[in-house]
Structure formats: C-alpha cells, structure tokens
Amino acid sequence: MVVETSHPPGSSSAPPGSGWPSSVPQPLGVGLSAGAFAGPTSVSAELEKLLAEAEKKVRSEANSVPDVPSPEAEVNAILPPEVLAALDDPLEVADDENVSGGAESQTPVGRGTTGGFTGGTEGASKPRGGTDAGDLASPAEPVTAHGEDDDGGPVWAESAGRRTASEMDREVVSRDVDAKPTPVPGRMEARGPWQRGLLVRDPGATPVPSDADYPPRTTHMRDPVVMPEEPFSAGPRTTAALQSGPVAPSAPQSAPRAEQTLELPSVLTPTYDGSRVLGVCIAGRLSATLCFEYSGALCRAVMRDGDFVTCGSSADDESLLAFLMLRGDLPREVGLQLVGKIPPFGRHAAAALIANGFVGQDQLWGVLRAHAEWLLGRMVSTQGGSCALEDEPQGRLRAEPAVFGGATGAEVLVEVTQRVLPQEDAIARIGGRGARLGPGPHQSLLSECALPERERAVVENAAGKAVHEVLESAGRPEFAAVLAALQDLGVVEVMASVGRSVHPEPDAFDPLDAEAVRKRVAARIALIQEGDYFEVLGVPRAATSYEIRRAYLEARRAFEPSRLLTVQTADLADDARLIVEVLDEAYELIRDGTRRDRYRRAIEAVPPRP
C-alpha cells in the first residue's frame, strides 16, 4: 500500500504548510511531549541578546540587494551535485496502488525557516516539529500521534495564523531533536529536492508504534542560522560575475596589424622591387604606413585595409610644387619663389595655392590625387633602397584625408603601373612572351581592379595560355603592364615556359635600314619645329583622350633610343632624345580635356579685325 502525505484538510482555518521544516520530520504515531509546552517559556538574557543580534543581521541582509550574477555566469553555472543526482534518479510511481496525496519535500537548512506543517497520513496532519517566537509566547496544546486532542477533535496551531511580521523575522532558530526515532517499517523514498516522498508500507508490516515505545525527547534552541551573503554557485566565480550593476564597456581594442603576417624585405632589389611590395601589402589588407627610402628621400604611402589613403615625400623634387611645375600647371619662376613657403604635400599645400590663385577651388581633389598617384609611380619604379612599415602615419600625414575616393588599392596599382612601366620591361617581369599564366592565390582581387569587361574576360580565360596569346587576345601591347601588376597582386601566377617557343622573339631593333631611320627622324624633327602638339603626336585636334594616349604610346615606342639606334645610326642619339622629350611634353599637356580645349582655342584664335 502506498500512502502519500498531504496538507491539512480544507476545512481547517490554519495556513497552508511550508516546505521549510526546522526539525527532522516525525514518523507516524509520534507526538510531542505534553510537558514541552505546559507553561510559559522564558529565555536567558544571553539568549535574548543572541536573538536580537540575529534578527538585526537578518534584517540588514534582507534589505541588501543580493549580488546577481551576469547572464554569462548563469549560462556557465554548474548545477549542484545533489541536483544532478536527483535528476538522474528515475521516478518510481506505483500505478497499481492508490496514491492519495503527497508529502512536502524536505529542503536543506541554509536560510531562515518559517512556520508550517509537515505531512501526515490517513488524512490527519500535525504541527511542524519546530517553534518560533510566537509559539514560545503561546504554547500549543499537546496532540496525539493522529493529530487529535484529548477531546477527540483535530488540533491546529492557530497561533501561526496570528503571527506578525516581526515575529516571522525572528524565525532564525528552530528546535532540534537529539535522538532520532526508530524508522517506520517500510521505506520513505525521497525522489529529489523538488519531488514528493512516498511512504511505501508493506501490508504485512507491524503496526505503527505509539508514544510509549519511544524514549522521552529533550528539546533545545539551535544556534542562529545566518543567510549566506552570496547566492549559491557551483562553478568558480570571477570578478566580472561578482560585480553588481552595469559594467562600463572597455575601450575597443584595435585589430591586429596586418604587417604581423606579411613578410616584406628590408632592402628592395630588382627581383623584389617596389611594385611587388605594394602588391603584397594590398593583397594582405595592410593597415599601416609603407615607407620607401631611396636617394636620400623618404616616400610614404598610407594604407587602410589594403586601400591607399594618401602619399607624401620628403624630397624637394617630389613636392606638390615640383609636380605642378613638371606638369606645366605652375610657371617655373613662380614655383621657385614659393619653395619653402608652403607645405611639401597635402591639402594645406593645395589650399595655399588656391588662396594665391594658382589652383582653382574645383581642382583641389584632382590635384591631390594626381600628386599622390605620381608619388606611387615613383614607388612602383623603385628597385633599390630600404623598405619599412610604420604603425601610424607620421607628421602631416596623420591629418590628411583620403584622396583616392572609392578607388581600391588594386585599381590604383594597375593604373599607376600602366603609366610608369614600359612594355618591354613588363614582358620581362612576367617571364617573357613564352611564359604561361595560371590562377594566383588572390584571384578574387580581379574584381577590384576595375578592368574593362573585355580585358577582365581575357584574364579569367588566361589559365594555361602563353603571354603572347593573352596579349593578342587583349588587343593592345600595353596590356603587359596590366599582367605585371596582376602578378604582383597575386591574381595570376606566371609559370616559366618549358622548351623552346614556336613563336620566335621579335628583333630587338626596328628592321628598317639606317637610311630609312635617318629620314624618319628628320621628318619628326621638322614637325616638332613647325607643328603643334597635335601634329607632333599625329592626332587630329578633335581627338579623344583615348586616341591621344594610344598615339603617344606608339610614337614613344617607335622613337625609343634603345630600339631605334644602331651602330650605323648612333649619331642620331641627340635627335632621338629630343623627339622623346617633346612627345612627353605634348602628351602631358593635351591629355587633360580642359587644358586640351584651352590649347586648341589658343592656336585657332585669329587676331581681331581693325
């Protein structure tokens, strides 16, 4: 037979039982001694002092806000071992037997206890085996083992319902039992800290003993139980978990520098020159300042996540004034007067030129970007000197804005490389015309190079093809510089050709004979002396920028002294150099649409009629 303990009957006026008993639950048939509450109870002065101190401490701890662990600590908290053991214990419910109720679960003593009742059997209940201050002032009547008084009626501790808040605060002491009674035949199975216990009684067991079968018990007051100052936590508590209130966010930590994983040489060489260093920094998403020191000058390029921000140089011949004078935007005599009066680079130098009327307000960002690209061209062409990285920009570079707009670092490097790297040098860098191309480790950077659709398709289909085949597919010889830049970025990988190429290398010099070369040079010299810049480049005055650029590159390659001159035409070296200088000058002047229109109106202007 399975009997489950329950609360007092619904007709009783007593409050419901509490799950916090202060003494060991009594077995069935055991009652309190009649002499325990026969008369008024008095306590000593020392005990009253202890009670007052305990009450004061409990009130102070109740008013204090407990230290609530953070959500992270609650997630990582470990359940107590007894809870885990209780969860592992399977439920044993007798389906074939009648279950009439449940007994209140026993809770370990660790905090103050409150008045209540422990469960009984057969529909009877008895007061909890513990007393509080209210019980001491008004002792309860003795009850029998079955919860009835001498008159035969059920007895309930009605004083528990009349206690005040002050009396309930003093429930920090409870009565203990020195001698534990003999267990009742059968078994009391405790399912867990949150489960009800079932008293399983064997039908053939002996009846429950009466009060006379047990020795008299003595009661005494327990020591005050102090509530723990901190909530229970099975895991180790950290300083962050013990802090109360919101924690101020710490300063954001900067991301690790990309240079920690980049392997850059400290000295530049022809095999590991400035163009390759810039490509490695772009592919590695560098966020630092790249410094090149060559010929006594220190040139810096500020980079952020692999993109260029701005550039600056400490050399006088690489300043903004020197660049504008070289490009023809600033008269040389005026530029020499301004040397030392304005900063060498940056927006402050451009602002000073704008204030003096040498640069228009709408040309500010164009001038700054052109100067930065010119300095990058110097860095790309550098094959000697030292290389270093700086964590933060130095000097004026710290406050300089980004002058490249939304252009990516790969796009800027491809554009600058096409400007400064001649075709033959580019072909030599990628292993010659017979070398074959393959996909590189950073092939995804191709989308950041801003190539035309046709050229991008050529690169995407270049795997396994020779360099000369790719150049023929691109349709322009200058595409070799693009391949060289893509190689530095890691977009393509160059594999040396095996065996002899079926396509013979072109002759190093023009096949024209010496007499034809002399006539060609003489005709170009006469054109330089008599014609304008459009005629020098061989383009009409309404030509577009693309036509002008293409004509300039073809003429520059045709009159390159290293290709044009032979032993028979060595005396034409001065004329060849003059032609090259005038071609460069003409292209720098008319490549820009605004200056080209101004130059065209000037040469087409007619004097006014009288």
Image: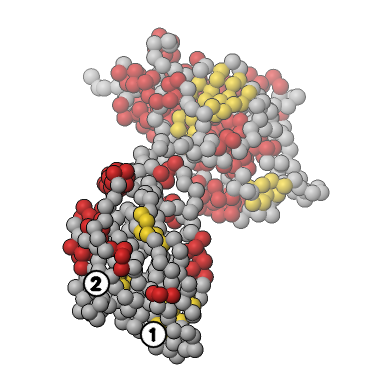
Q: For the residues carrying marks 2 and 1, which lies nearer the camera in this image?
A: 2
Is 343 positioned to the left or the right of 485 in the image?
left
Is 593 positioned to the left or the right of 186 in the image?
left
Q: What residue type is labelled 2?
A: Trp
The residue depicted at 55 percent of the width and 37 percent of the height is 258
| C-alpha separation, residue under disc 2 versus residue under disc 1 | 24 Å
Q: Earlier in the sequence, mark 2 or mark 1?
A: 1
Residue 22, x across and y down, in percent: 36, 61
The residue depicted at 44 percent of the width and 17 percent of the height is 344
Q: What residue type is labelled 1?
A: Val
> Where the C terminus falls, by quadrant?
top left
Is 268 positioned to the left or the right of 144 in the image?
right
- Could you say which is closer to the camera, residue 501 or residue 487? 487
The mark total stands at 2
Disc 2 to disc 1: CB gap under 8 Å: no
Q: Which image quadrant is residue 212 in? A: bottom left
> Where the N terminus falls, by quadrant?
bottom left
- Could you say which is closer to the camera, residue 461 or residue 233? 233
Residue 557, x across and y down, in percent: 61, 33
The residue depicted at 35 percent of the width and 43 percent of the height is 244
Q: Residues within 10 Å of mark 2 (few under 14, many from 20)?
A: many
Residue 53, x across and y down, in percent: 30, 43
In this view, which residue lies farthest toward the right?
499
Secondary-structure class at tag 1: loop
Mark 1 sits on what residue?
99
Q: In this rendering, does residue 586 appear at all?
A: no
- Could you say which is closer to the camera, residue 59 or residue 601? 59
Q: In this rendering, does residue 220 appear at all?
A: yes
Residue 156 is marked as 2
The residue depicted at 69 percent of the width and 30 percent of the height is 270
Q: In this view, does 450 lie above or below 176?
A: above
